[in-house]
Image (cartoon, rainbow, N blue to C red):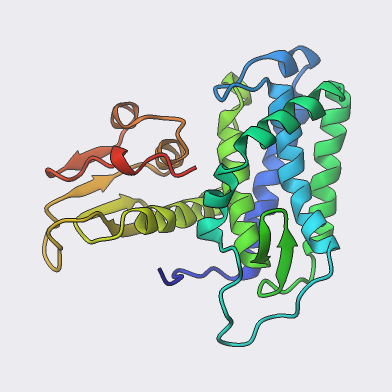
Amino acid sequence: MPRRRVRAFPDLVHAASGQWGRLVVVVDALDDAAFAEPTRIGWTVAQLCAHIVRTVDAVSRALGEPARPAQPARPARPACTAEDYFVVARERYEAIDARARVEAAGQSPAQLRTALGGAVDRARADLDGRDGQTVVEAALGPIRLADFLETRCVEAVVHGLDLPGSARVDPDPQALRAAVRLLTDMLAARAPGRSVEVRVPPYAVVSCGVGPQHTRGTPPNVVEVPAVVFVELVSGRLDWAAALREGATASGARADLSRYLPLL
């Protein structure tokens, strides 16, 4: 599937940086007892924070490897793109889970706060002046820096929403836009076709799903989902019925997206 809606790299840097900043503010404000509280994904807050630190620090780790030169105007596809990054990551979820538990067990709340702030400061500094077309060596393989930063926006938005109660992080609007656009690309790739129009206002509209193709007029199958609900739906935090209760709407016989989900 061809890439579309390519965002300017400085915008992606701003988006990721803004979301990371929101995470730092919230985590810094947590009292020590909150780090033992459960999140909705089976981790404690401490374990989730340890994982967030690693996802942010992944930028500096990737940029610390010998970089490949910026690609020519028509580059060959890197081994890993933003769309398939999370497909590859799914194969490593058990290892990711185990590592988060081990890393959290070895750090106090104060250390986790310091680690997150330090990771964000390093990533921001390391991204300064970089070329988004440069192919970096991430843990899951070579990937364009711009694509990798899109995955960081998804991680930061999703995990900010995973924090419990009042610690839940309202997404930075630019980071939310980047996350929605990547996730709608992934949905269209998972369910190729033009039977269903999926709208995530104000950020994205895609067609997907096998069936009668829509070409003009009002589509016969339409799904419209608020942006945050969409992120939670496709990341497996909400099921289809819960998404409908949270403001998603669906019309048409083929408008149930649950067969294609979750994406992450």
Q: Between residues 200 and 253, which one lies in front from this camera angle?
A: 253
Q: Between residues 159 and 1, which one lies in front from this camera angle?
A: 1
Residue at 46 percent of width and 57 percent of height: 181
Residue at 38 percent of width and 52 percent of height: 187
Question: In this image, 107 relative to 199: left or right?
Answer: right
Question: In this image, 242 relative to 183: left or right?
Answer: left
Residue 30 coordinates in the image, percent (x, y): 74, 22
Residue at 31 percent of width and 33 percent of height: 247
Residue at 12 percent of width and 43 percent of height: 253
Rendered position, 92 above or below 97: below
Residue 228 coordinates in the image, percent (x, y): 45, 39
Residue 176 coordinates in the image, percent (x, y): 52, 49
State the quadrant of the N terminus.
bottom left
Question: In this image, 180 relative to 67: left or right?
Answer: left
Figure quadrant of residue 46: top right
Residue 82 coordinates in the image, percent (x, y): 55, 60
Question: In this image, 172 relative to 192: left or right?
Answer: right
